[in-house]
Amino acid sequence: MLSSAFYTCSSHRLTATPVANSNIFTDEELFAIPRSMVLQKTNSDLYLKLPDAFADLGSWDSLIIVIVYEYLRHDSSPWFPYLQLLPTTFDTLMFWTPAELSELQGSAVVNKIGKEAAEENWNSTMLPTMFNNEALFPFSTRSPNGRARELLKLAHIAGSMIMAYAFDIDVDDFDDPGEDTAEGADSDLTEDDEESPAKGMVPFADMLNADAHRNNARLFHEDDFLIMKATRNIQAGDEIFNDYGPLPRSDLLRMYGYITDNYSAYDVVEVSADLIENVAVSAGTDQSYLAQQVQLSGKGGLKFADKQTARRA
């Protein structure tokens, strides 16, 4: 369901720009997506065919395996036309060459890419499931090594699609409802844990660009629909923007492959725990006190007292 006040200036998915056709007021509905159209674990028949395969998979890995399955079904998948409109090449750091990554020397973002950790995880979780169910994950090549390479390639593409386009679904019980999934992800494709909300690909909703200052719409979760609503008044002719949340530009580059000054207000300087520990030791901080603080840092509590207090602790 699409509001008459909403239109796109191009019919091509990758160049479409959603624009207000007339004045739109705060809380006005722009469009509604039935939950049955959301590409997610519980909507795919793979969930019924291989229920045990999802038992130990987190939200990211579950959606990756579903995207690969639906892509390989081609026209038999209700989401195949949608998947064909999504990119299969990306400019995110996951796909940078070592020479290109060397340009980011000294930046903590390089340690967040997590490509090797992701592949190690997939080799023990998702890939065996896909490899051992050839009828559900068919390839033209019969070579085991060839199939493994193709499955890994598709897993990276699917993971990058999630990073760039997916939403957190039914996130109302979490900190920031309605935001794009990328906010807060610590490393590419390895953000799974039991506390993470479900991930889903929401056709049409993911066509909105994001802007830290001009964002004027957000996705809301209702019982039967996901509804994009205006969060402020929008003038006729203005572009309609979603928001990634308070992402520093380093994470914008890592997740989406570009940077913009609009997110500079969220830039941070990240200092490694090892560097903090080394400086604290050289400054004479008591070792037992330091060990206690390092342990607390895992809970977000790394707080040093003044130098004299630390030495006496």
Image: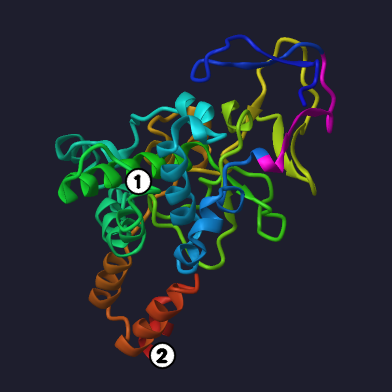
Q: From where the camera sits, is residue 288 visible?
A: yes
User: In this image, 125 relative to 260: left or right?
Assistant: left
Looking at the picture, does residue 78 appear above or below residue 6? below
Q: Which marked residue is nearer to the observer: mark 1 or mark 2?
A: 1
> Residue sitting at 64 percent across and 27 percent down?
241
Give residue 33's quadrant in the image. Answer: top right
Q: Residue furthest front?
A: 135
Find out whether residue 200 is within the magenta segment: no
Looking at the picture, does residue 223 appear above or below residue 288? above
Image location of residue 267, percent across then percent down: 46, 43
The amino acid marked with disc number 2 is Ala
Identify which residue, 118 or 210, lies in the foreground: 118
> Residue sitting at 49 percent across and 74 percent down?
299
User: In this image, 25 relative to 41: left or right?
Assistant: right
Q: Which residue is mark 1?
A: 155
Identify which residue, 221 or 151, lies in the foreground: 151
> Residue sitting at 23 percent across and 49 percent down?
148
Looking at the picture, does residue 98 appear above or below residue 113? above
- Give the residues in magenta: 23-36
Image location of residue 303, percent across then percent down: 47, 73
Quadrant location of the C terminus in the rendered image: bottom left
Image location of residue 24, percent across then percent down: 82, 20
Find out whether residue 24 is within the magenta segment: yes
Identify which residue, 165 or 157, lies in the foreground: 157
Q: Which residue is mark 2?
A: 313
Q: Earlier in the sequence, mark 1 or mark 2?
A: 1
